[in-house]
Amino acid sequence: MKKEVIILMLLLMPFVYATELIISPEITENDIGENFTIDIVLENNESLYGLDFKLNKINNLELVDYAFLNRTNNSMTNFVEETNTYRFGILFATNTNGLTTGNGAIIRLTYQGNETLEEELLFSNVFLSDKNGNEIQTNTNQANVTITEPAQPITNNAHLTCTGSYGYQGETVTIQIYLHNNKTDIGGIDFYQNFGSKVIFKSATTTSATTNGMLATNPETGKVRIGIAGVNITQTETIILNVKYEITAATGGSILTFSTVKISDTEGNLIEITTNKMDDCTIDIETLPDNSNTGIGAGGGSDSSNSNSNTNANTNAGGGITPYTSLLGKQKTKEIEQEQPVFHTQTTEEETEESEKEETTVVKKRTSKAVPIAIVGVTALMGIALYFVFGYRKNQPDGEY
């Protein structure tokens, strides 16, 4: 029985007192470009004077730095980079106490991953010795290293958009400017809006989101600078301005674009502008409708029947005539109806008698001038006739008539 107990104890002793060389942590996961550390830990060591081992290299996993820690003080250390491995060595003089007994890290390694990977770190050629150079039984482990793509950070960003409009030449139209952001403490906005030559900037006014702030505008040729300060916009999408433009061209349109946009939080820190989401808008210029069918004459007058018929056609048409023309036709018809009595008033008997007297006087005057002229003409004709008659008889031969 005693013999069996001794044998069992001898079998268990290597496992109880065996030194362990460990890679810690055994599992590590980091992002590309991120530095991380791995420790080489020695446990259960006694009377250790020599240590020699290798670690495998992993493609795209760079060993940035290494350091022998305090437990290796008063020793000679060595590091060699080989083709496929890194070799580490520690050696204590025999006249020292050797490696401090106990547990703890002896070497610290700093790595950085350059690409995504999942690989294992492995020991090889491990040799530990005592003061006399005898090998010490050692257990080792392995570690799993994973390198992943870094998570995209959530950054504070914002951008502006605007709504378009349309109108006729000479009209003033309003466009609205929106603020979009993923941060709810916007304190200031500064930008240029470019508008070209077919419209003119008139004014800008704040909305409920910006009414407590200070608004400043600085119009220039083809653009206007607008600044808002001292606000606290908490909405992620809101209307911040109403901007008015006067249309000066007859046709075409004007594209409104943003430039030099700066947006800050309530502490004055600039927020990233997502320019790819910036949205322009357009003011379309409508062509004025043709009013030639409204019954309005170029000289200011019109025939009442024509005017009425044209007006009815405009107002009853099924969509071929624009409301603008129909409204104008109705308005002109009322004006013509008011003017009709002026052209159709009946003359009185006194006015008729006076007009007949005037016409008789004119005829008499014209007749008195015409009588002398007629007498002179008849006399002249008779003289010419007598001349030819007597002249003809004088020239005839005797005996002839």
Image (cartoon, rainbow, N blue to C red):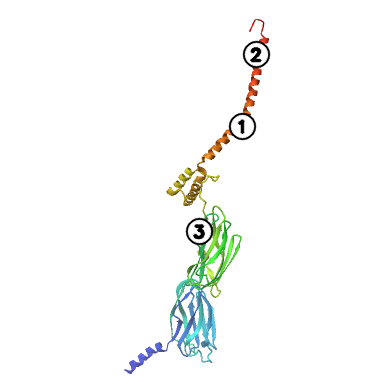
Residue linked to disc 3: 165
Q: Nearer the viewer, residue 238 or 84?
A: 238
Helix, strand or loop under label 1: helix
Q: Nearer the viewer, residue 388 or 204?
A: 388
Front-most of residues 201 and 382: 382
Farthest residue in the top direction? 399
Please state if 337 lies on the left or on the right of 7 as rendered: right
Residue 202, quarter of picture: bottom right
Q: State the mark number for residue 365.
A: 1
In this view, which residue lies farthest toward the left?
1
Q: Nearer the viewer, mark 1 or mark 2?
A: 1
Amino acid beneath label 2: Val
Query: Residue at coordinates 36% horizontally, 92% vertically from top-left?
Result: 6
Tell me the amino acid under the disc marked 1: Lys
The numbered mark, 3 or 1, whose residue comes first in the sequence reads 3
Could you give the CA–CA distance between mark 2 and mark 3, rounded to whole angstroms? 98 Å
Q: Residue at x 65, y 13 (%)?
A: 389
Residue 126: where, in percent of width, then height?
A: 47, 82
Image spot of residue 17 (x, y percent) = 42, 89
The quadrant the C terminus occupies is: top right
Which marked residue is nearer to the observer: mark 2 or mark 3?
2
Residue 280 showing in the rendered view: no
Whether residue 147 is visible to the viewer of this picture, yes or no, is: yes
